Image (cartoon, helix red, strand yellow):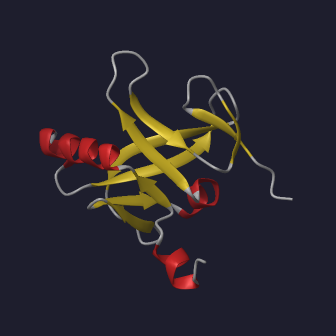
């Protein structure tokens, strides 16, 4: 049974080991991102109403900060409502490779995998 301490210890957004390794590689290969952290966010748009975004950014005062496999992840308060429990994986494949987002709050995801329809809060 999960305790409150276990729930609080779980990051808002988790990276798999593969995703964390790929983020570290990107950070080391792109000098313009030195000192920045991975930000995962949602915004209006895409085929299904909301779309995901990922960018290397700096910490803002109201960010929620998590960590997976040594990689910090920033989430703004607006996105946090949509991303709680999300897992980000990285698949290295010739077709269909890249970051894959598994969001338990997505009622419907687009075929492109970059947009989703959020569950209604009822």
Farthest front residue in view: 1
Using the image, determine if residue 69 lies above or below residue 1: above
Residue at x 45%, y 67% (from the top left corner) = 63
Q: Nearer the viewer, residue 115 or 108?
A: 108
Total marks in image: 0
As drawn, is 36 to the left or to the right of 61?
A: left
For residue 28, what is the image quadrant? top left
Residue at x 60%, y 59% (from the top left corner) = 78
Q: Nearer the viewer, residue 70 or 1?
A: 1
Residue at x 31%, y 59% (from the top left corner) = 58
Q: Nearer the viewer, residue 87 or 37?
A: 87
Farthest right residue in view: 122
Residue at x 58%, y 54% (from the top left corner) = 83
Relative image position of residue 100 (x, y in whole percent): 46, 36
Q: Nearer the viewer, residue 58 or 38?
A: 38
As drawn, is 55 to the left or to the right of 13?
A: left
Relative image position of residue 56 (x, y in whole percent): 31, 48
Relative image position of residue 2 (x, y in whole percent): 58, 77
Farthest top residue in view: 95
Look at the image and tell me in which quarter the N terminus lies: bottom right
Look at the image and tell me in which quarter the C terminus lies: bottom right
As drawn, is 9 to the left or to the right of 57?
A: right
Using the image, determine if residue 93 lies above or below residue 12: above
Relative image position of residue 119 (x, y in whole percent): 76, 48
């Amino acid at each position: 049974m999960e305790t409150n301490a276990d729930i609080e210890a779980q990051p808002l957004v988790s990276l798999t080991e593969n995703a964390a390794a790929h983020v570290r590689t990107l950070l080391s290969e792109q000098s313009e991102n030195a000192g920045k952290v991975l930000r995962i966010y949602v915004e209006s748009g895409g085929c299904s109403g909301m779309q995901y975004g990922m960018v290397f950014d700096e910490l803002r005062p109201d960010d929620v900060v998590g960590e997976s496999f040594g990689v910090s992840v920033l989430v703004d308060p607006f996105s946090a409502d949509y991303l709680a429990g999300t897992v980000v994986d990285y698949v290295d494949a010739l077709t269909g490779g890249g970051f894959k987002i598994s969001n338990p709050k997505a009622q419907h995801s687009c075929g492109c995998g970059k947009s989703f329809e959020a569950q209604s809060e009822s």
